[in-house]
Amino acid sequence: MKNEKFLKSQKILRLATIDSSGSPHIVPVWYMYRNGKFYVGTNTRTQKAKNIKKNPKVSFCVDVGVRSPDIIGIMGTGRARLILKKDSVESFSKRILLRYFKSLKNKSAQQLLDQTDCIIQITPRKVTEWKY
């Protein structure tokens, strides 16, 4: 993606999955962007993880700004998969959380680390970028 620097600087990605009735389920998530893919830590009991297990099609959006010239965004569609291998989950989780916490010793960081049992890996297929 052209705007890799923007994706690495932002903190919230809105992730849309499809539930069992075919309806969209949209959630803001913390993420890491690396090597052309997005990584999101979560728990297999969450709705987004359950949806991805049944249907890997996702949409996403990362954007900022309410007035020009600082309106920037990237949205797209892609495929998601759940990474469940314990050591991979722990490694990704730590890297994601360190984007949001100064230290993993923080109580909230530890709670999130303990609750995370899978990583959602999103491979973008079609991407649209804008800047005004």
Image (cartoon, helix red, strand yellow):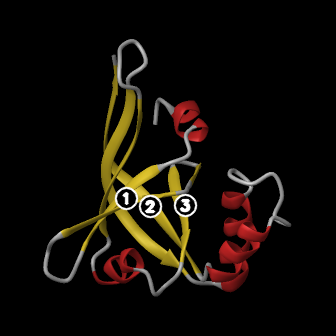
> Mark 2 highlights which residue?
122
Q: Secondary structure at mark 2?
A: strand
Q: Amino acid at mark 3?
A: Tyr
Q: Is residue 23 left or right of residue 41?
A: left
- Contact, mark 2 vs mark 1 (Cβ under 8 Å): yes
Q: Residue at 56%, 45% (x, y): give it.
A: 11
Q: Residue at 44%, 61% (x, y): give it.
A: 122
How many C-alpha atoms fall within 10 Å of the one at disc 2: few (<14), some, or many (≥20)?
A: many
> Mark 1 highlights which residue?
15
Residue 75 position, x and y percent, is 33, 42
Work out how far the residue at label 3 is from the one at label 1, CA to CA, in angstroms: 11 Å
Q: Amino acid at mark 1?
A: Leu
Q: Earlier in the sequence, mark 3 or mark 2?
A: 3
Residue 125 position, x and y percent, is 33, 51
Q: Secondary structure at mark 3?
A: strand
Q: Amino acid at mark 2?
A: Ile
Residue 88 position, x and y percent, is 68, 75
Q: Quadrant of residue 22?
A: bottom left
